[in-house]
Image (tube, rainbow, N blue to C red):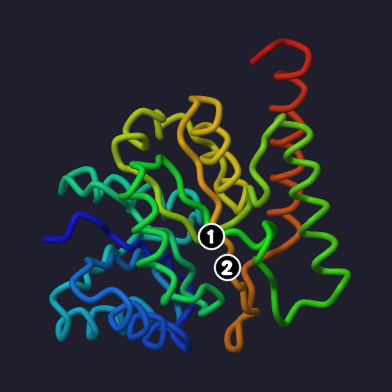
């Protein structure tokens, strides 16, 4: 068993999953992978099972229903806890994250025992391809608002490509994390930063998905804005 587990949450990612898993296998042979599928109607979970049957490093965790990104990752974290991994890697199933970068992120984490290594779009050397200028501005503005509200020094709080030290995750009281959408990434990063964890941002190129549909919708944006504002008000005025 490897010391790292790559977690790939899926919901209706049949078109891209095999390509992503093949890229992970090519870049990180021997590293274990867990596909966490939220009962995808398009059969993604069954496709993952077929792939797993031919690839012993790939495992599949089936969940009963779609419950959001946060609960899917927490289920994956708990799976990692039970098997004593040292690191977990988060990566999207849509191909937007370059799996070839995984060894670099893991290498940084291992070299300095970092608590969080973020594949960042918004540090020097990072970039996004396939997004319009307005969409890039919205992402940058959202990150800027979150940094200001939370008094954070992290450039890409919403990044979904990252390595987290399991020992640190065990200290975060995952049962108290309420975020279900992409705000989950902000909440995890903020908790690690607030706990004075070691955080490193490594530049990546983020590529807009070529197939399938984005899971982003207005409800996710509203959840993130409301939670960040609430956390920020508590921190600025009440010191918590």
When the figure is inspected, residue 25 is found, relative to residue 153, above or below; the finding is: below
Q: Residue at x 61, y 73 (%)?
A: 205
Q: Residue at x 44, y 85 (%)?
A: 14
Q: Residue at x 77, y 22 (%)?
A: 233
When the figure is inspected, residue 119 is found, relative to residue 176, above or below; the finding is: below
Q: Is residue 175 left or right of residue 190?
A: left
Graded by Cα atoms within 10 Å as few (under 14), some (14 to 19) or many (20 or more), the crowding at tag 2 reads many
Of residues 18 and 31, which is closer to you in this image?
A: 31
Q: Is residue 67 left or right of residue 107?
A: right
Location of residue 216 in the rendering, given as x and y in whole percent from the top left corner:
67, 65
Q: Residue furthest right?
A: 134
- First in sequence, mark 2 or 1: give its number: 1
When the figure is inspected, residue 139 is found, relative to residue 176, above or below; the finding is: below
When the figure is inspected, residue 222 is found, relative to residue 16, above or below; the finding is: above
Graded by Cα atoms within 10 Å as few (under 14), some (14 to 19) or many (20 or more), the crowding at tag 1 reads many
Q: Is residue 221 left or right of residue 181?
A: right
The reply to whether the C-beta atoms of the residues labelled 2 and 1 are less than 8 Å apart is: yes
Q: Which residue is mark 1?
A: 119
| Numbered disc 2: secondary structure | loop
Location of residue 94 in the rendering, given as x and y in whole percent from the top left corner:
52, 77
User: Which quarter of the figure has residue 128?
Assistant: bottom right
Location of residue 1 in the rendering, given as x and y in whole percent from the top left corner:
11, 61
Q: Which residue is mark 2?
A: 204
Of residues 66 and 159, which is closer to you in this image?
A: 159
| Numbered disc 1: secondary structure | strand
Location of residue 11 in the rendering, given as x and y in whole percent from the top left corner:
47, 71
- The Cα atoms of the two marked residues, 2 and 1, are separated by 6 Å
């Amino acid at each position: 068993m490897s010391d790292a587990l790559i977690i790939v949450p899926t919901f209706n990612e049949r078109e891209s999953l095999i390509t992503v898993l093949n890229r992970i296998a090519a870049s990180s042979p021997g590293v274990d992978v867990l596909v966490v599928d939220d009962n995808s109607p398009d059969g993604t979970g069954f496709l993952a099972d077929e792939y797993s049957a031919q690839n012993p490093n790939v495992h599949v965790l089936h969940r009963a229903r779609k419950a959001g990104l946060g609960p899917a990752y927490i289920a994956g974290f708990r799976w990692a806890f039970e098997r004593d991994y040292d690191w977990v890697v988060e990566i999207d199933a849509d191909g937007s994250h370059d799996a070839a970068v995984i060894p670099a992120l893991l290498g940084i984490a291992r070299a300095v025992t970092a608590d969080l290594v973020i594949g960042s779009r918004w540090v020097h050397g990072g970039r996004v391809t396939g997004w319009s200028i307005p969409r890039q501005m919205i992402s940058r503005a959202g990150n800027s608002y979150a940094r200001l509200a939370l008094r954070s020094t992290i450039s890409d709080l919403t990044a979904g490509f990252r390595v987290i030290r399991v020992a640190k995750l065990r200290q975060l009281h995952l049962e108290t994390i309420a975020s279900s959408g992409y705000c989950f990434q902000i909440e995890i990063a903020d908790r690690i930063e607030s706990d004075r964890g070691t955080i490193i941002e490594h530049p990546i190129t983020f590529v807009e998905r070529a197939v399938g549909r984005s899971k982003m919708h207005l409800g996710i944006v509203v959840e993130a804005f409301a939670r960040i504002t609430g956390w920020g008000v508590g921190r600025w005025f009440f010191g918590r």
